[in-house]
Amino acid sequence: MNGLNLLQQYIKEQELTGVILISPINLHYFAGFTGTIGFAIITQDKAFMITDFRYTEQATKQCEGYTVIQYETTVMDTLVDIFNEHHIHEGLFGIEGKQMPVDTYETLCDTLDERFNFTSINFAKLRAVKREDELDLLRKAAKIGDDAFAALLPQLKVEMTENEARIILESEMLKRGSEEPSFATIVASGNRSSMPHGVASDKVIEAGDFVTFDFGAVYKGYHSDMTRTIVMGPASELQKKLYGIVLEAQKRGVAAVRAGITGKELDAVCRDYIKEHGYTKEFNHGTGHGVGLEIHEEPVANTKSDTVFTENMIITVEPGIYITGTIGLRIEDSVIVKSDGYEVLTHSPKELIEIGI
């Protein structure tokens, strides 16, 4: 299953002649193609996938609804042949303004004459609402992350480095079917926990440290995303206080997820609670983002987002508190938006875990 029908409906609604796709993410979503060399042309009623001999057989199997064409000279020559054969001599085409290299765009303009015009489209918005098959893959990716985290916890030890903990976690995900980490795994301990994106380092994890793990698995191209913060040994009063604030803010945020809420309304649920407890500048990033074929997708939840959430969008809910150079934590779940509420994808325990207690 792919997003071809959705894309052709969009082309009709926007009164476009067609769209041209080259980015691997959009080729995967709208054509089902997972090769590395592809150039797709989609009109209101036709779809073509241009690739080289290495991927012709693969594309034929993957690209349902597409005519697969193996180029012999150049992609642009093949493009011209397609346009001539199907009498496409002018029109407005949507392109991936954020992904198409300038050189490719210039070559496209040089190949086609002035009767062709181009407009940039944010295709990520078309991918925001997930199909049922996508939701199943996202559930699987999230389960891999949950199971790997459960396997990590008994292996955590004081005096191991953040990188050693990262290697264990990533290995446990790979054992369970992850293709690769969703992103550079964050393991931030002690005073490094105040860094929201403190990727794993050679710092030694010490007794009493908060340790924040922000990580994800990739399953059949789809990403999971979850953050949990644990403490190595008994938690201090400050750690208990901060954790309690963030946990309650996060729970309130998850409970607020539903179709009809806007990104900034969801953000305010978490942010206002943290602010009520005296921490304003210490929560200095957005509350959440979409997840799918990319780790950061539409929609977003931040102070400026007017996006209205609709059913089967995915949003992360990830408030945190970060006291620069001293201490920090974050708790994150990935959540499916439902018409009457939500479905949480990530199920690892959120109550404070004290390792060794």
Image (tube, rainbow, N blue to C red):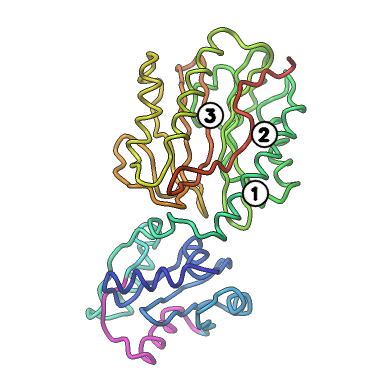
Image quadrant containing the N terminus: bottom right
N-terminal label among 2 and 1: 2
The residues bearing labels 2 and 1 have C-alpha atoms spaced at a distance of: 13 Å
Q: Name the residue rendered at 38%, 73% in the picture.
A: 8
Kind of residue at disc 2: Arg
Q: Position of residue 137 (x, y in %)?
A: 60, 55
Residue designated by label 1: 180
Under circle 1, the secondary element is loop
Q: Is residue 156 left or right of residue 122?
A: right
Residue 76 on the magenta span: yes
Q: Which mark is drawn over residue 331?
A: 3
Q: Residue furthest left?
A: 114
Kind of residue at disc 1: Glu
Residue 287, picture quadrant: top left
Q: Which residues are magenta?
A: 73-93
| Closer to the eye: label 3 or 1 | 3
Kind of residue at disc 3: Ile
Under circle 3, the secondary element is loop
Q: Name the residue rendered at 35%, 58% in the picture.
A: 122
Contact check, label 2 and label 1, Cβ < 8 Å: no
Q: Position of residue 167 (x, y in %)?
A: 70, 36
Q: Position of residue 269 (x, y in %)?
A: 38, 29
Crowd band around label 3 with a 10 angstrom C-alpha radius: few (<14), some (14–19), many (20+) = many
The residues bearing labels 3 and 1 have C-alpha atoms spaced at a distance of: 22 Å
Q: Which mark is drawn over residue 166?
A: 2
N-terminal label among 3 and 2: 2
Residue 177 on the magenta span: no
